[in-house]
Image (cartoon, coloured by chain):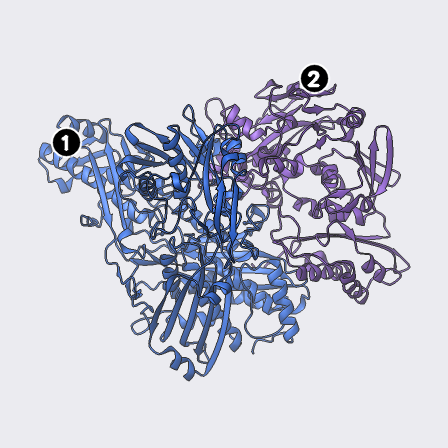
Chain colours: A purple, B blue
Amino acid sequence: MADQIRFLHRGQVQHLGDFPPTRTLLDHLREDRGLCGTKEGCNEGDCGACTVVLGGLEEGRLRYRAVNACILFLSALDGKELVTVEDLAGPDGALHPVQQAMVDCHGSQCGFCTPGIVMSLFALQAEGGAVERQRVDTALAGNLCRCTGYRPIIEAACRMGADPAPVGKGAATEELLRSIQRRETGQIKDGKVLLPASADDLAALLLRHPEARLVAGGTDVGLWVTKQFRDLGLLIHVGGIADLQRMDAADGRLTIGSAVTVARAAERLGGLYPEMAELFRRYGSAQVRNSATLGGNIANGSPIGDSMPVLIALGSRLVLRRGDDRREMPLEDFFLAYRRTALTAGEFIEAIRVPLPRPDRLFACYKISKRFDQDISAVMAGFCLDMAGGKVVAARLAFGGMAGTPQRARAAEAALTGRPFDAETARDAAAALAQDFQPLSDMRASAAYRLAVAGNLIVKFQLAQTMPLGAVRVTNFAPGGEV
Amino acid sequence: MSAARPLRAPDPVPFPATHRDIRHESGAAHVTGTARYVDDVPEPAGTLHAALGQSAHAHARILSMDLSAVASYPGVVAVIAAGDVPGVNDVGPVVPDDPIFAESLVEYAGQCLFAVAATSRQAARAAARLAKVKYDPLPPLVTIAAARAAQSHILPPKRVERGDPDAAIAAAPYRLSGHIAMGGQDHFYLEGQISLAIPGEGGDMHLLCSTQHPSEVQHLVARALGRPDNAVVVEVRRMGGGFGGKETQASLVAAAAALLADRTGRPVKLRLDRDDDMVMTGKRHDFETGYSVGFDDQGHILGLDITLESRCGMSTDLSGAINDRAVFHSDNCYFLPSVRITSYRYKTHTVSNTAFRGFGGPQGMVGIEQVMDDIARHRGLDPLAVRRVNLYGGPGRDLTPYGMRVEDNLAPALIEKLAAEARYAERRAAIAAFNATSPVLKRGLALTPVKFGISFTTSFLNQGGALVHLYADGSVLLNHGGTEMGQGLYTKVAQVVADAFGIGLDRVRISATRTDKVPNTSATAASAGTDLNGMAAYNAAITIRDRLAAFLANRWDVAAKDIRFVDGMAMAGGQTVSFDDLARQAYLARISLSATGFYATPKIDVDKETLIGRPFYYFAYGAALSEVVIDTLTGEHKLLAVDILHDCGRSLNPALDKGQIEGGFIQGMGWLTMEELVFDDQGHLRTHAPSTYKIPGCGDVPDHFNVTLYDQPNGEETIHRSKAVGEPPLMLAISVLHALKDAVAAAGGSGPVQLDAPATPERVLMAVMERQATGPLAEGTA
C-alpha cells in the first residue's frame, strides 16, 4: 500500500492514509485515538512527557527507541512498531515491572511526567544489559521531572530488573516489521507528503519538486509546526530510506548516510573516538538522538548544532547529490551564513565522510552549556592537531556558538602550527581567538564568557595531554573515598 | 467562623496507616497513564478550544485593536476582549489590578488582550496571532535597578527594626557590607495551565481546572461573569504539579474559558502552550539584597542592617505576603540582637511575580546566609563556625526580629547531628588537601540550616474544611478543601481518616476537591495542606465516630469513651462488631453518617503593618551538607554529594515526606544554580521554553544523596504531631550555592566571594576570574 503508512501497534498492522501532512503522533494518539496516557508537556521535544517507544529494524535487528511524540510527524511511523504507556500493563491490569518498580519506589508524585519516564525506562530495559547510573542518566536526560528530584526514579530504574517478556519481540514481530518496510515510493494526502523508498527516488523527486521540504526526524522542523503554525508545503519524508541509512568504513574514512540517526552515528563514532562518546551522550536527549539524523543537523545550518564543530575539526566532508550528480566538499565550506548553506535547488546531502582516527593526531571536543544534559551549547568546540616531531604540523579548531555559522579559528590555528603543543602555545592560541571571533551575547551566555571559555578550552586541551581527564573535567571527576 | 475543634490527645487508636510509607494514592494510575488530568477528560460534545492574544510590548498604550482577522479565521466561533466581560474584568487575588483583558494599557510583554474560541486548538492558536493592534510604546521598567531609580513601588516599603542597628554596627570590632542578587524561577509544572468550562442551566458554570485554589477561582470567575459565587463550581482532581504557580495564576485561564463558554453556550477548553504559559504566568520574585553588618572576632553578629528589594512585576498579586515572608526569614536560624530589615516591593513592566514554593522565605534566607559566609571569609573562619555562634539560643537569644519567641529551637542539635554523621570536619580537611594539589578542579563544601515558619502569614487563611461520608456498607468517601498536586496530600489525609475509623485505607475513597462540597477554602499552599485539611478531616471523622460510639454505647450499655475502633471493628467490654455492620446498623437506626469538619490554626496573631507578632504556629527545621566540584577554566560544576537531616515532626508518611525533601532540594538547586530567566531590555522574556530555561535533569542528581528524617514529635498539637514539609526543603539547597562559593574561594583571592544566583557556569567562571585577578591563593585568613 504505497499511499498509506503502515505500522505495528499491539501486534496488528495499522494502515493510515488520510491525515494532515504535519499531524503529530501525540495529537494523533490523544485526539484521534483517545489514548491520553501520553502527555504534552512542552510541545517541543524538551520535556519527555510525550515519550513513546518505536521498534524498528536496524541492520536487521529489532531495536526499541524512545522518541518524543509531540514533534514526530505521523509519517515517521512508517515501517515501525509503536508502543505507548497504555500497552505495558498486562491484560489483567498487572503492572509491567518498570511500572511496578516506579510505584514501589515512590517514583511518581504529580504523575504528569511519569508515563514518559516509564516509556524511557522501558526502552532502556529493552536494550538489555546491566542498568547502572550513567545509563539511567543517559536514558532519562530527555525526561524532566519537577517533583521528585529523580532519586526514586533512579532507584526504580535500578530495581526494574531485566526485560521479562519483551513486548512484541521475537521472530514474529521482526517478520511483521519486515513485511511493512517501504519498497516503493508512496504519497500521502494527495501528494502533500512523499515517501521515497530509495535515494534514487529521492533524487528524482527533488529534481521534480525542488521546493519540497525534506523531513527526517523532524526534531527541529516539528517545532515550526507546533510553535509557529507554519505551513511546510510539500514534505518529503526521508527517514525511511534504507540506502541513506548505511554506515561504511573504507579508505580511512567512515561514510555515514545522511538519514542515519544521531543515535546510530553516535554509537559508531563514539567507538572510533571515545572523546566523542561523551559529546553524543549530551547531544540533545535519547529521544532527540533517536529521531534526529546527522544529515538533518548539518542541512539545518544552525550555528549551534553540536555535531558540526567536531566533524569540521576532524576534516569531515559532505557528499551532495543532485539528480545523478554528486559533489564533495569540506563540511566547513557548506555553511555560507546564518542558516544558509551551499545546497542548490534539488540538491541534498547524501552522506557525511568522517576521517578515521590516526595515531599522530590529538583530538578533543568540549560542550559548554548551563545544564550538562540536553542543553543547547553556549560554546561547542572540536580540536584536532596533527603532530610530527613534537610539533603541531596541522591544526583544526572549530567552534559553534561563536559566530553565525560553525567556524574554524584560523588565527588560533596559526598560533599553534609549527610549535610544540605546550602551555605557552596554548595560551597564545587562546589569545588569538579574539581575532577569530566576536561572539554575541544571548540568553545562553555573554560574549565575554564565550570568548573566555573558548580560549580556556584550548588551555584545557593542552593540560589534558599531561593530566588524567578526571583532573581536568568535572564530568570525569570521581570523588575518592572521602564522601 | 466557628471555633476550632480541639485535638484529642493522646488518641487511643494505634496507627496502622499513619506514620507509614504508604504509596501515593494515584501511583498505579500514574504509571499506567490512566490518571486523568483536565486535558485527558473526554471532552463534552461541541467543546471549543481557546487561545489568548498577547501584547507585543511590555509597556504601551493600546491605540486600537482590530480583531476582524481573528474572528474570520476558519473555525473561529467567538472572540472576546475587555468590553465583553459582563462582570468585573479582573482576577487580582488581593488588589484588583490584574485585568483579564487589557483595556487601554499593557504593562508586560505577553499580557492578555483578548481570547478566541475555535473548533480546534490549532485554529484558536493560529487565529490569536492575527490581531492587528496599534500601540503607543512607553519606556518599560524591566529591572530592579530601573524600578529603584524610578521609585516605582507596587506596595509601600515595610521595615522591621529592633534596637539600634546603626550604633551596634558602628561600635562593632568588625564591619562589612555586601550584596547578593538572586534570580526568579519559573515553576515549570509539567502540566501547563488549563481549564475546561462547561456551561450549565440558568447561568451555572462548572470548571475543571488545574488550580491550587479552587475557591478563589470560583470567586473570580463568578465575579467576571457577574454572578454570585454559588453559580460556579470548580473541581480539581489532581494537578500535574503546582509549586505555587497554580495558586493565583490559574484564575485568568479559568476566567477566559468561562467567559467564552458563557458567550457561546458551549464547553470551552483553554490550555496554554508551554511557551505562552512561561510568558504569561508569574514566577518567583527575583531579589537584590544588600547589607551592613557589625560583628566580633568570633563572627557574632552585633548589628545588622539588611535591605531586600524585589521585582514584583506589573501587579500586586501576592507580592505583599511574599515580601513579608522574606522579611520573616531574614533571620533564618540566627539571633540578630540589633537589626533593621527593610523591604522594597517594586513595580516593573514584567509579568506579575507570584507564589513559588517558599514564598519569599528562600530569598530572605539567601540574604542572611550570604552575611554568614561573608563574615566567615572576612575573618578567615569556617563558615559553619560562624553559623553556629549565631544560632538562636535560650532566654535572651530566642526572640525573632518580629517578636516571635523561638520555643522549639531544633537547629543547634540538628546541625550538630548532621555535621557529625556526615563528617563535616573530616571532609573539609580532605577537600583542602585535594584543592592544594588540583590546579583545574576545585572542590567546595557547605552546611546550611533552615528554619521555616509554618502558617499563612495572612492569619485568616489558616482554616481548613472537610466533608466525610460514611456509607451504609462501611465504605468512606473523603473530601476536603486541599488539592492534590503530587505532594501526597490526598494520601496523607486518607491515612488520617482510615485510622480515625480504625479501618483499612482501601475502605477510604478520595474524591476530587470541589467548591460545592467544601466551601470557602484556602489555597493549598504555605505547606499547610496537611495541617489544615488533615485536621479538618480528622475532626469530621471523629464527629461520625462519636455518633457511632454513642449509638453503640447505648446498645451495649458501655461508656462511649471505652469503645475502640480498630482493625475494621468496634469493640468494648468483650463485645465486637465489624465496622461495616456497625455502619449498616447505625444507618437503620437513623444516625447521620455524614459530617463536615473544620479546623482553624490556634495561637497565631500578627500585625499586618508592623509585621510584629506570632505569624507562625511553629517552625520546621532542616540542614543540608553539600559538596561540589568546579572547573576553574569553564565554570562548569557538579554537585557531588548531599546529606540532609530534616524535621517533619512525627511524619505521617516518611516516604512521601522524603519525596518532598528530595524534590524540594533539587528544585532549590535548580533555582540557585541553573534556572535563569533572561528578560531583554525591552522586557521580553527570552527563556520561555525548556530549550532555553533549564531545570535540573536526572544527571544533575548526585549518587550520594542521603535524606534522613529528624524524628521528633511536633511540640505543637498538629495532626498526629507531624510537621509541614512542602516548602522548607527547597531552602536546603542554599548549601549548594555556598559550596560553590567555597570552591570559588579555593581558586584564589581572599575575603568574601561574590557569586550571584543562579550560579551558572558563566557566573562561576567570572567569580573565579575576579578572584584570581584580585589576589593570591587564599590561605585561611584574610
Badge 2, how many Cα within 10 Å: few under 14, some, many 20+? some
- From the viewer's side, name the closer residue of A205 and B411: A205
Q: Position of residue B432 (x, y in %)?
A: 60, 69
Q: Position of residue B298 (x, y in %)?
A: 45, 78
Three-letter amino acid code of the residue under disc 1: Ile
The answer to whether residue B63 is visible is: yes
Residue located beneath label 2 in the image: A2
Q: Position of residue A425 (x, y in %)?
A: 82, 65
Three-letter amino acid code of the residue under disc 2: Ala
Of circles 2 and 1, the one toward us is: 2
Q: Taking B455 as reference, is B116 left or right?
A: right
Residue found at x 62% / y 27%: A74
* Viewport quadrant of the N terminus of chain A: top right
The numbered dot on residue B591 is 1
- From the viewer's side, name the closer residue of A240 and B544: A240
Q: Is residue B752 above or below residue B621?
A: below
Q: Secondary structure at mark 2?
A: loop
Q: Which chain letter goes with mark 2?
A: A
* Viewport quadrant of the C terminus of chain A: bottom right
Badge 1, how many Cα within 10 Å: few under 14, some, many 20+? some
